[in-house]
Amino acid sequence: MSEATKPVVKDVTTMAAPVSLKFRARAGKDLSRFLRGMKERRIVGRVCPSCNYVYVPPRGACPTCGCPMGDERVLPETGTITTFCIVNIPFEGQKLKPPYVCASVLLDGADVALFHLVGGCDVNDVRMGMRVRAEWVDEADAELSLETIRYFVPTGEPDRPLAQIREHI
Amino acid sequence: MQQPIDGVLEAPYVMEYTYRRSLGPVMSAFFTALRDGRLLGARTASGKLVVPPLEWDPETGAAIAGLEPVAEEGVVTAATWVAAPEARHLLQEPFAYALIQLDGASTAMLHAVACASLEACPVGTRVKLVWSESRTGSLRDIRCFEPVK
Ligand SMILES: [Zn+2]
């Protein structure tokens, strides 16, 4: 082997030092109902009987009032972006190619925002107050997962004024 | 995702940080040597041989005087039994985790000893290093130690 074709053996200068914690997670009763709703491509929330706040995903107790939550409520698939960020940095395990948008989406009739992705438009067009709608995966691909909503896409409706959503940011 | 009879969903949940750390000049030389099938220790100013090497003399905090080759045989100074190895362990058969003081070394290093039972690996047992067939520059380049017949 000539000098030129000899493989260069480099020094070892780094080592993999992963930290891994393996859990078995239980969703709890309310989140289980929410996830079953996802499989049927329905968004299930729950109403507090005391303050009338609608939580989605639902919870067992109202975090504000402390009382057990009341009726279940199926929410529409439309909502408003309250806050968002553009993800520009790649990281391990990432499912989408940057840049993409993560947003808090306040579904119509809900009082807390759902954290999800925004797609179907240029990342630079996303703004607070923008109207969006859930884009579902195909029925056959629906799972017990929030990923059954692929992402939220702009509806093209006029933005909601910030004053109307400020309370929910 | 599983659906247990009480209606509450369950799923595996793994939290993982895929860190990679830089080694610095001393540990880089140690791991490069491991990859090349050689074990190095750190010689301190007072003449002790620290294995595996440290970057600094643990007694004085001074930089080590240098790295040098270490014998591949030594003696067990403490051991415990791993009856049910997990996937992350070095060996998939039950084995002993042992502190092994290599000949000439001033300290003991922790590694696996392949043996039939803890009784087969009492304190004082002489063991020798077994290299892994494929080495990448990690402590796993030492496959294990085994008792000297
Ligand atoms: Zn309430």
Image (cartoon, grey):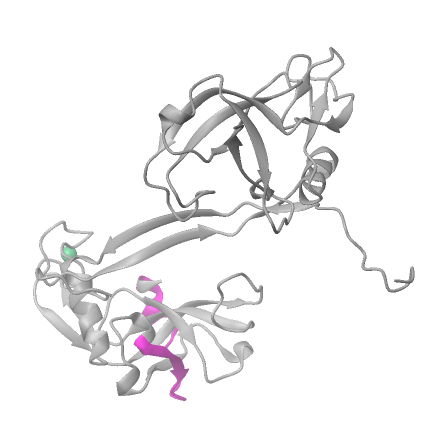
Q: Position of residue B88 (x, y in %)?
A: 43, 46
Looking at the rendering, the quadrant in which ligand 1 lies is: bottom left
Q: Going by the image, does A167 lie left or right of A42?
A: right
Q: Residue furthest right?
A: A3
Residue B132 appears in which quarter of the rendering? top right
Q: Is residue A154 found inside the magenta-colored segment of the image?
A: yes
Please give left or right for residue B38 compared with residue A117 in the image.
Answer: right
Q: Which residues are magenta?
A: A148-167
Q: What x and y, as percent, mark residue B41?
A: 69, 26
- Above or below, A142 relative to A88: below
Asked where in the image residue A49 lies, by quadrant, the reply is: bottom left
Q: Position of residue A133 (x, y in %)?
A: 34, 83
Vertical comparison of B10 with B29: above or below: below
Kindly identify the residue that appears in the image at 76 percent across and 14 percent down.
B45
In front here: A163 or A54? A54
Spot the residue most to the top.
Answer: B46
Instruction: Give the farthest residue toward the front.
Output: B149
Total number of numbered labels? 0
A121 drawn magenta? no
Quadrant in which the C terminus of chain A is drawn: bottom left
- Asked if one can make out residue B4 in the rendered structure from this viewpoint, the answer is yes
Percent from the top left, x then y, of residue A22?
35, 50
Say which residue appears at 48% left-offset and 34% top-offset.
B112
- Name the side, left or right, on which A154 lies relative to A72: right
Residue A159 visible at all: no
Q: Is residue A90 left or right of residue A42?
A: right
Q: Nearer the viewer, residue B115 or B32?
A: B115
Name the image quarter holding residue B58.
top right
* Quadrant in the picture for the N terminus of chain A: bottom right
Relative depth, front residue between A92 and B95: B95
Work out whether A41 lies above or below B75. Answer: below
